[in-house]
Image (cartoon, rainbow, N blue to C red):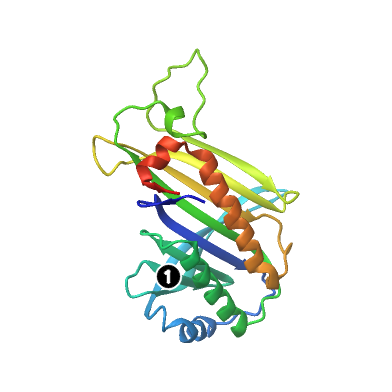
Amino acid sequence: MSQYRNPPIVEAICEFRFSQDTKWDPTIPGLLYEKLKTEFPIKESRLEQEIQIRGDQKGIKHRIIPTQKAVFLKENRLSLVQIGQNLLAINCLKPYPGWDAFRPQIKQAYDAISDITEITGIDRIALVYIDKMDIPEKQIEMKDYFKFYPQLGGELPQTHNNFVIGCDFPYNKNRDICKLQLTSALPEKKENLAFLLTTEYFLARKKSIPPAKAMDWINEAHTVVKGMFKGCITEKMENIFGRID
C-alpha cells in the first residue's frame, strides 16, 4: 500500500457493539480505565443521544435514548477510548499514525475489556476511515481525481456544487458490508475544493463471528478499506498527498 507525506485521514474509528447477554455493570468503565490509564491517562464523561428505530405492525417507531460514555484520552488528546453500555470504541484523530500504531490500540482496549467481562457475542464491529481531500483548484474534472464520483448524463448540466453519493458493497456472503460515501466539503482555503470520503466496513450479521476472532476480522476489514480507498482515487489525487512508494 502506498504511503503519503500528507495523508488525508482526519479520523479512524473502530467500534464494537456487544450482545445484550454480555454481562455489563456500572463498574466496567472504572475497571477498564485502571487497565488503560498508563496509555490513556485523561478521563472524561460524555452524555450523548442515540436514535433507536423499530418497526412493528403499527409502523415504524423512533425513540431517543440518552447514553453515558466514559472517555479515556492520550495526553495529546489525538487518540481515545470510549466505553458505554455494551459499547467499546477506539478513535484516532489527525495526524493518523498509521495502522501499525492504530491496530495495537484497538487490540489493547479489546483485550482489556475481554479480561474484565466475558464477551458472549458481538452484534456489530465497524472499522471507519474518514478522509478529507483538499484540491488546490477552483474547478476540476472529477474523473481526473476520482474513480468514484457522480456520473451525470449528457442531458444534465455538467457543473455542480454540493453532492452526496454512496454505495454498499457486500462481502463474505453478505456477512459484512463496506459502505462508501463521497460528499463535497468545506475547503481549508477559499480557493480550493474539498471532498470527504467515508469508508465504513462493518459486520452486518449479528454474532456471525466468535469474540476470539474479532482481531482477525479487523485485519480483514482493514485490507478491504485500504483497497477501497485506492480504488476511489487517481494517481493525480495521490500526488496531492505526496505519495511515497
Foreground residue, 164 or 144? 144
* Residue ranking furthest to the left: 190
Give x and y (percent) for residue 130: 45, 51
Q: Badge 1: how crowded within 10 Å, few (<14), some, or many (20+)?
A: many
* Residue ranking furthest to the top: 155
The residue shown at (52%, 67%) is: 103
Foreground residue, 105 or 1? 1
User: Of the residues shown, which amino acid type is indicated by label 1?
Assistant: Leu
Give x and y (percent) for residue 96: 40, 60
Seen in the picture, residue 37 relative to 207 is either above or below; the reply is: below
Give x and y (percent) for residue 202: 61, 55
* Residue ranking furthest to the front: 245
The residue shown at (72%, 69%) is: 210
The local secondary structure at tag 1 comes to strand
Foreground residue, 199 or 58? 199
Residue 195 visible in image: no
Which residue matches tag 1?
80
Seen in the picture, residue 15 relative to 111 is either above or below; the reply is: above
The residue shown at (42%, 70%) is: 80
Residue 146 visible in image: yes
| Quadrant of residue 126 within the rendered picture | bottom right
Seen in the picture, residue 224 relative to 135 is either above or below; the reply is: below
